[in-house]
Amino acid sequence: MLRKIIIYSIALIGGLVLLAYATNTDYLLKAVRTIYLKGHTTAFLDDYHEFDNRTVKIGDSTYSWPKHSLYNTSEASERLIKTHQDLGTIAYVVIKNDSVFYEQYYQGYSDRSNTNSFSMVKSMVSGLLGKSIMNGTIESLDQPVGDFFPEFSEGLAAKMTVGDLSSMSSGTNWDEHYYSPLSITTRAYFDDRLRDVILNLKVVDTPGQKFKYASGDTQLLGMVLEKANGKTLTEQLSETFWQPLGAEHQAYWQLDSEASGIEKAYCCLASNALDFARFGKLYKDHGNWFGQQILDSAFVAKSITPRFEESPQYGYGWWMHHHQGRDFFMMKGHLGQYVIVNPKDNVMIIRLGHLKAPHHQSVQFTEDIPIYIEEGYSILEQAGL
């Protein structure tokens, strides 16, 4: 009986593998191996270990965030502690006037731990677009995508610009669903042929008319940047931002396959809270980093301004949020990865973790975001700041 069970099991597994290849869903085999068999239903914080990566290198000179004179003198409220426990926070940092005021790590993670950025990296890719425009390798936000990929040079697709990709208004048929194993988002995460997945997208609506969140837009933008600059995205990020901003730790950018593959531009840069925060400071300071103009200030201003009046929550690679009379812009990623910035108060709040509050399709910002904002300000107010 045991022998029969083993034989039938092997036959069943073999049949499922053949079926996956026959139906062009063989990417699910990688999904099962890297995610589902490890007890997860979606990508997770430490999953970069399961994929090929390129290393984003640090420079010879690094910058350590100074600690405020009242560093960690405030205490977290019971509400914040419960939120951390319920949602699996691993890092919570409050920075005031470019000094770390409050910093806590949980579950064995530290300021050196690398975890998945998820979609926070979209803001960085948009920044690479701004740098390419500064350098002249891309003409402007209005340059057609078809100039780089002829697959998008006819019909409605011919109207699609690099600015449309950065502002999530490409008009493609991308469907953003994280938990469906058959969605294009899941395929993009696990498929070894990510370029083909993206180049097979169809433009079904007039580009540049309305906001529709689509990770495929950022992936295509990353492919444009790779072609325009003749370098991998990892090389561009390291040379353009990671080293000039004095990042202290190497980061790791997931690839679709072996080391000669393509970066998942829409997600998956493994880094830490304080290195992620550098991008908040760069945009807070209008693209200037201690006297060096890294990004054009006009591009920065445009990035953190809504492109479409009916979609005030998104600009070019950055989210905007208004809460309790304050205006914030932010980097935002799957499972609750946030860099939240208020330039007026010179405050940044960084949270990384395993979960976010339940998502309701009618809202763009989950209920945990106001908690992190309110509690961050409460921590500052305890010290009279």
Image (spheres, rainbow, N blue to C red):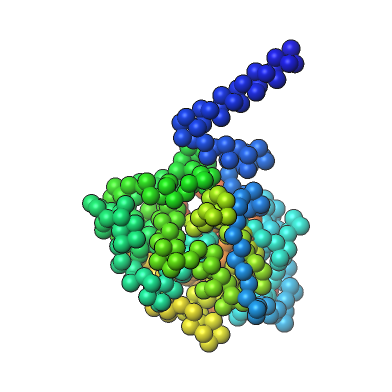
Give the camera-side residue of 126 and 19: 19
Residue farthest top in this picture: 1
Q: Split into 4 quadrants, where in the image is the N terminus?
A: top right
Give the camera-side residue of 167 and 353: 167
Q: Residue at x 53, y 50 (%)?
A: 256
**58 sits left or right of 340 in the view:** right
Q: Residue at x 24, y 53 (%)?
A: 154
Residue farthest left in this picture: 155
Q: Is residue 51 visible?
A: yes
**244 sits left or right of 306 in the view:** right
| Place of residue 21 in the rendered image (x, y in percent of width and height, measured from the top left) | 50, 32
In this rendering, the count of numbered labels is 0
**218 sits left or right of 249 in the view:** left
| Place of residue 251 in the rendered image (x, y in percent of width and height, measured from the top left) | 62, 64
Q: Is residue 148 above or below residue 12?
A: below
Q: Is residue 374 visible?
A: no
| Place of residue 74 in the rendered image (x, y in percent of width and height, measured from the top left) | 72, 72
Q: Residue at x 50, y 39 (%)?
A: 180
Q: Is residue 196 above or below residue 320?
A: above
Q: Split into 4 quadrants, where in the image is the C terminus?
A: bottom right
Q: Residue at x 41, y 50 (%)?
A: 198
Q: Is residue 121 above or below residue 292?
A: above
Give the camera-side residue of 62 and 207: 62
| Place of residue 246 in the rendered image (x, y in percent of width and height, measured from the top left) | 62, 77
